[in-house]
Image (tube, rainbow, N blue to C red):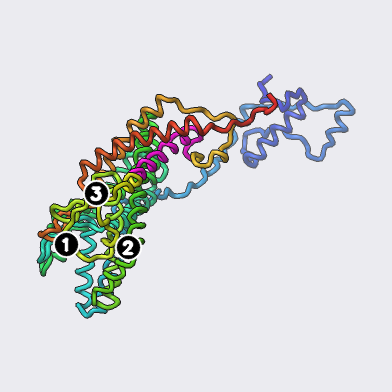
Amino acid sequence: MPSTTDRPDGSEDPFAVAEAVQSVVRDTAPPEIRPGVPEAPRLDETQDVNERRETGHRDTVVIDDEVLGRRETVRVPAQRRPPATRSGAPLPVAVVFATLWAALLTYLPVAAVIGLARTLEGAGGLSGAARAGAAGWLLGHGVPIGTSIGPLALAPLLLSVLVIWRLNRAGLHVTRAIGARRTGSVGAALVVAIAVGTAYAIVGALTARLIDGRGTEVSLTQAAWHFLALGVAGALLGSLRGTDAVSTLARKVPEPLRHGVRTGLVAAFLILGAGAAAGGLSVALGGGQAADIISAYHTGVAGQAGLTLVSIAYAVNAAVWAAAYLLGPGFALGVGSTIRLTEVNVGNLPTLPLLAGLPAGPMGAAGTLLLMLPVIAGAVAGWGLTQRLRYGRAHAWRPGSRPGADVPEPGWPLLLGTSVLAGPVAGAALALFSWIAGGGVGSGRLSEIGPDPLPVGLIGALVTVIAVLIGAATARIFAAPRRRGKNPGR
């Protein structure tokens, strides 16, 4: 007997087998009768199968595989797939748009402030305000501007911070636009940063070319290099965050080094914050003198507003100078001048509201208390290190919100190694900030302004090592972790 197909549910009933075969044939295609080919046997649809089963009369159904195999096969058309779509915008388009947008958003505030002051004072039209705004914009990138009194090389760091922030956003937007978000690719982050930096360097060179001459001298080479460095640095911050490559790099770095870099940067920024608080308090206490300085300029409301805005633009510089003052090395406001806790030696200074908070002389015993501010800042960073190792980064300062049972104690070797590594990191960061916060105004006495980076970095590294270790050890010994999930009756 010819072989049969698989019977449904292991049934031996030929009627059930026939019904299964007919169902398959009907679902595949309607039968076609050809001359000379016998038709496959089928059951009469009007036949009462149950009645025949009860009477015991069953027909024999022959399943001919050869006949079934000669039937035409119906080909079901393949489902159409949607056309492939691009995962993001082309890199050049995204880079050009994001870079120009970042440049425009950082240039317009400078041009608006300078243009308003010049218009109210009747010192020029729109073109003059645009050129003056471009010169101030270049100065915010650290590009020296040659003038009749000498080069202006003291960058307003508040504008520089705004530039870095917008470039950071540009790198993040380009990363999203090209479809590289959360890919963890370090290469994609570098490509985005280099592309944005290159485009930004072109913008800087073109701007320098436009304002060069007519009382201002700007080097195209210096402008291109400064814009390239800021563009790559700022965009790299955004692209690393956008691609989540920071996590990829962190997993490859040894744990003590990873925690040391983070703790050192936190300590450096806390020391700068202490300097900003001390400098702001000093200016506030000398508010009467600052008001007298502003009123001494008979330039009208617009001129006085411009003078105030200039002081605000250099507020970040003053915070770095104050941090260097708290650390001990101090800073200079002119050739041969010294301003530190134990010595104040300055000559004739320009009357600016920002300088109203300068100390009148050595601090004496009060200076000892001011020296404790950087130590406290570093100790806070060390405290945060221990708490982060205990509870994780998300719950370092709110350990009560951390789920879980037992909290592990960080080992002493890890705390000691991290504290030692945090010192050089903080020292290097403070030295870098001291370098970019300095400069000169003209070629005369004010050609040297700001702290010396080398002593600030060395003392900052030493203070950070000691302070971080004190804070980490204090948290390790006295701030006992909260134990959870234990029976208090035991």
Q: Amino acid at mark 2?
A: Gly
Cα distance in 3D space between marks 1 and 3? 17 Å
Q: Residue at position x 24%, y 77% from top? A: 299
Quadrant where the C terminus is found in the figure:
top right
Occupied quadrant, residue 26: top right
Quadrant where the N terminus is found in the figure:
top right
Cα distance in 3D space between marks 3 and 2? 18 Å
Q: Amino acid at mark 3?
A: Arg
Determine if the magenta segment contains residue 375.
yes
Q: Amino acid at mark 1?
A: Asn
Q: Is residue 180 above or below residue 111?
A: above
Question: In the rendered image, which residue does mark 2 sit on?
Answer: 286
Cα distance in 3D space between marks 2 and 1? 18 Å
Circle 2: is it few (<14), some (14-19), or many (20+) Cα within 10 Å?
A: some
Disc number placed over residue 340 in the picture, else none: 3
Between discs 1 and 3, the one toward the N terminus: 3
Circle 3: is it few (<14), some (14-19), or many (20+) Cα within 10 Å?
A: many
Nearest to the observer: residue 55 or residue 490: 490
Residue 441 showing in the rendered view: yes
Nearest to the observer: residue 239 or residue 482: 482
Q: Position of residue 444 (x, y in %)?
A: 10, 60
Q: Position of residue 266 (x, y in %)?
A: 37, 42
Occupied quadrant, residue 317: bottom left
Between discs 3 and 2, the one toward the N terminus: 2
Q: Residue at position x 20%, y 69% from top? A: 132
Q: Which residues are magenta?
A: 371-393
Between discs 2 and 1, the one toward the N terminus: 2
Question: In the rendered image, which residue does mark 1 sit on?
Answer: 348
